[in-house]
């Protein structure tokens, strides 16, 4: 029985992962901002076979609440086998270009708050000498594209942080996995004009995440074909790249 | 990224814009938003209704599939409380290992709970357990004018009765609680026997139905003269001993829609002849997995695509017992003569358990269902069939329908006025507009 902490537990990818863990009888500590949605998610996981769930509502941009959340989590789970950090927003790039406050707020949610949580969790995992820290970043972090570079910057920060953390915690027997989903059919991407052929279902991504955790993968593109797409995008020379509207 | 939705038969061809949402609390706002913008909307589950009953008159459908959470399960009592977008397959996957099964299941497990209620679906055990509506304890209905209402036999009972079989028009079902039935094994003990004409079918049905939980027959709709009315009679029961397993058979998929229908007179004749000959003349017993017994077509994903771009229509009627044999004989004669129809011709005796739903389809009598590739000559053929059904006091199944005329409908379903009176003004389907005006 796995003991799982999920931050951003009501997000579509997190829910899809949690349902698969619930089938195997996992015990959950679920964190999200909206209490009502969180409780509905928790009830669903219990019905699907979870051994226990604790719901905890928290706003990730309130850093002072992180320590308390982790204390409560450890009181409930005793040990964390998997911590999945899945919260995030998809900022409106154009608005962020005009509004510094908004840009920094979005950066806080998608970047800084993850770094804060990972720093706290790393200490716990270092003591445990076991477990997996799974972090959902994005393919958007691989290159600063004009259409959403604020989001990309935050995700790049998370990915670079994970790379360093992974090397640090490897010596302690702790696995860190940086998950980079492409376009996924979730409430976050609803209404966006994305190419249909590239859109994955949250369940597809979740299956890959669970496999990646089991196989101790370090960087996981989900679905896998994004590795090839991003390789090509990374290889586009600057003098061409800056002329695109990607 | 807004997806287009179709009815299962892809006829009439009326692509629906899908409006997705994810939480029960958003439901009422979604109805208001769509009604303000487009005049009306209609809930759409997993797209297993064949005709136009699942198509919004505004072509703006509220896609319910994302409401797929379980709310509470009780494996002692065998009750499941879940959101309306949960499919029957998802319930089975959860319930079977605990020794429970759906009391009533239609021929596909990909229908949603909301869809199963809205069409008051039935299955091979109608003669034993009635319709899906007979096993609903309560449900939550969101109306544009009243918000969320809990409906049961005792609470908001008018809405309860008109929503079961109410074609999604009385409000939007947000969640429901259903009763399951206990099983010892997920496998089915089946027994199959051939019959060579319609009279034999009725004899077999009278003899075997009351002894078995499940009973259904396949009939060769192309056979003429001496072979007319030949078919295969299938009965089944949940096995007393055996595993409680979820079947995860490999599913094949029809990857794309061909330009023309793959079902034609030649392929059909070959199939029917082979299928009939494949079954031995004597009664034979077999152990079958639940999914191959109940859901043989579900193993071929997107099977509706074999009918090509023009799509297909299913004709499903039920004829009251008194006239059942003669009228069915007449129907089959006309169908065989037309040379149309398909290998999915199903005959089933319905029982006399009344559904709580006002607009429920089954009657004590015999139901005949078969698919036809869409083509212009269907209208005339269906007219002739309708006349026989109507004269015999029978009726057609709205869940499958894309053609019946309003006069026949209103006569066969006198409760339509009550449903119309309780209809949520924000909801309107192409079917309803077609039959009530």
Image (tube, coloured by chain):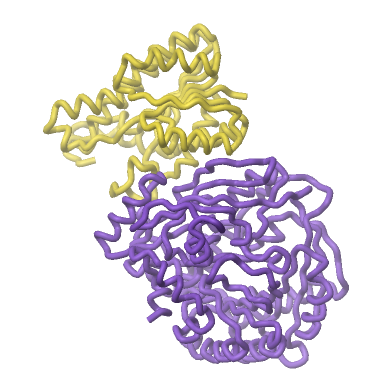
Q: Kindly identify the residue that appears in the image at 51 percent across and 84 percent down.
A: B411
A16 or B183, nearer to the observer? B183
When the figure is inspected, residue B319 is found, relative to residue B243, above or below; the finding is below
> Looking at the image, how many numbered discs can be counted on the residues?
0
- B147 sits left or right of A213 in the view: left
Residue at the extreme front of the image, as rendered: B154
Position in image of residue B70 (x %, y %): 53, 43
State the residue at coordinates (16%, 39%): A243
Residue A217, compared with residue B224, is above or below; it is above
Asked if residue A16 is positioned above or below residue B62 in the image, the reply reads above
Task: Give coordinates of residue B430: x percent, y percent.
Answer: 39, 73
Q: Which residue is drawn at 66% across and 45% down?
A: B95
Residue at image point 45% right, 72% down: B418
The yellow chain is A
The answer to whether residue A68 is seen in the rendering is yes
Of residues B158 and B42, which is closer to you in this image? B158
């Amino acid at each position: 029985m796995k003991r799982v902490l999920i931050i951003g537990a009501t997000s579509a990818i997190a829910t899809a992962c949690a349902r698969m863990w619930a089938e195997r009888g996992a015990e959950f500590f679920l964190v999200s901002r909206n209490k009502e949605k969180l409780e509905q998610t928790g009830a669903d996981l219990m019905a699907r076979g979870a051994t226990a769930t604790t719901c905890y509502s928290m706003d990730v941009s309130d850093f002072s609440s992180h320590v308390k959340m982790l204390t409560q989590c450890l009181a409930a789970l005793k040990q964390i086998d998997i911590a999945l950090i899945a919260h995030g927003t998809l900022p409106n790039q154009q608005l962020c270009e005009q509004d510094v406050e908004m840009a920094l707020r979005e950066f806080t949610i998608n970047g800084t708050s993850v770094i804060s949580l990972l720093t706290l969790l790393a200490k716990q995992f270092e003591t445990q000498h076991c477990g997996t820290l799974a972090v959902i970043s994005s393919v958007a972090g691989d290159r600063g594209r004009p259409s959403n570079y604020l989001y990309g910057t935050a995700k790049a920060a998370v990915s670079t942080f994970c790379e360093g953390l992974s090397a640090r915690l490897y010596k302690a027997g702790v696995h860190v996995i940086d998950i980079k989903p492409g376009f996924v059919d979730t409430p976050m991407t609803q209404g966006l004009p994305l190419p249909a052929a590239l859109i994955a279902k949250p369940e597809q991504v979740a299956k890959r995440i669970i496999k990646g955790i089991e196989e101790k993968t370090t960087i996981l593109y989900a679905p896998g074909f994004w590795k090839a797409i991003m390789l090509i995008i990374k290889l586009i020379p600057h003098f061409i790249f800056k002329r695109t509207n990607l | 990224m807004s997806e287009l939705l179709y009815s299962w038969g892809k006829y009439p061809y009326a692509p629906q814009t899908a409006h997705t949402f994810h939480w029960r609390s958003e439901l009422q706002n979604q109805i208001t938003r769509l009604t303000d913008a487009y005049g009306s909307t209609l809930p759409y589950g997993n797209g297993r209704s064949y005709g136009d009953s699942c198509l919004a008159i505004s072509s703006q459908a509220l896609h319910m599939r994302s409401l797929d959470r379980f709310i509470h399960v009780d494996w002692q009592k065998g009750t499941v409380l879940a959101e309306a977008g949960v499919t029957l397959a998802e319930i089975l996957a959860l319930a079977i290992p605990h020794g429970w099964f759906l009391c009533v299941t239609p021929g596909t497990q990909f229908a949603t709970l909301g869809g199963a209620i809205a069409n008051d679906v039935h299955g091979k055990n109608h003669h034993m357990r009635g319709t899906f509506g007979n096993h609903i304890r309560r449900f939550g209905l969101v109306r544009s004018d009243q918000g969320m209402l809990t409906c049961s036999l005792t609470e908001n009972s008018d809405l309860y009765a008109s929503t079961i079989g109410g074609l999604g028009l009385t409000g939007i079902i947000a969640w429901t609680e259903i009763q399951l039935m206990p099983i010892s094994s997920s496998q089915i003990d089946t027994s199959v026997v051939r019959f060579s004409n319609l009279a034999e079918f009725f004899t077999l049905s009278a003899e075997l139905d009351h002894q078995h939980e499940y009973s259904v027959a396949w009939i060769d709709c192309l056979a003429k003269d001496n072979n007319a009315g030949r078919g295969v009679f299938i009965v089944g029961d949940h096995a007393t001993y055996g595993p409680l397993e979820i079947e995860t058979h490999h599913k094949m998929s029809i990857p794309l829609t061909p330009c023309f229908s793959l079902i034609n007179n030649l392929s059909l004749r070959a199939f029917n002849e082979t299928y009939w000959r494949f079954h031995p003349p004597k009664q034979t017993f077999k152990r079958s997995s639940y999914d191959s017994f109940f859901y043989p077509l579900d193993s071929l994903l997107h099977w509706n695509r074999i009918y090509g771009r023009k799509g297909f229509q299913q004709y499903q009627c039920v004829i009251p017992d008194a006239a059942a044999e003669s009228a069915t004989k007449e129907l089959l004669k006309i169908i065989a003569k037309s040379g149309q129809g398909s290998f999915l011709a199903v005959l089933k005796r319905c029982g006399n358990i009344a559904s709580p739903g006002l607009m429920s389809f089954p009657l004590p009598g015999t139901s005949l269902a078969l698919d036809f590739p869409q083509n212009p000559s269907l209208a005339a053929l269906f007219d002739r069939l309708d006349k026989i059904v109507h004269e015999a006091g029978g009726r057609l199944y709205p869940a499958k329908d894309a053609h019946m005329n309003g006069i026949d409908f209103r006569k066969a379903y006198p409760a339509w006025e009550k449903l119309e009176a309780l209809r949520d003004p924000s909801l309107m389907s192409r079917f309803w507009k077609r039959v009530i005006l």
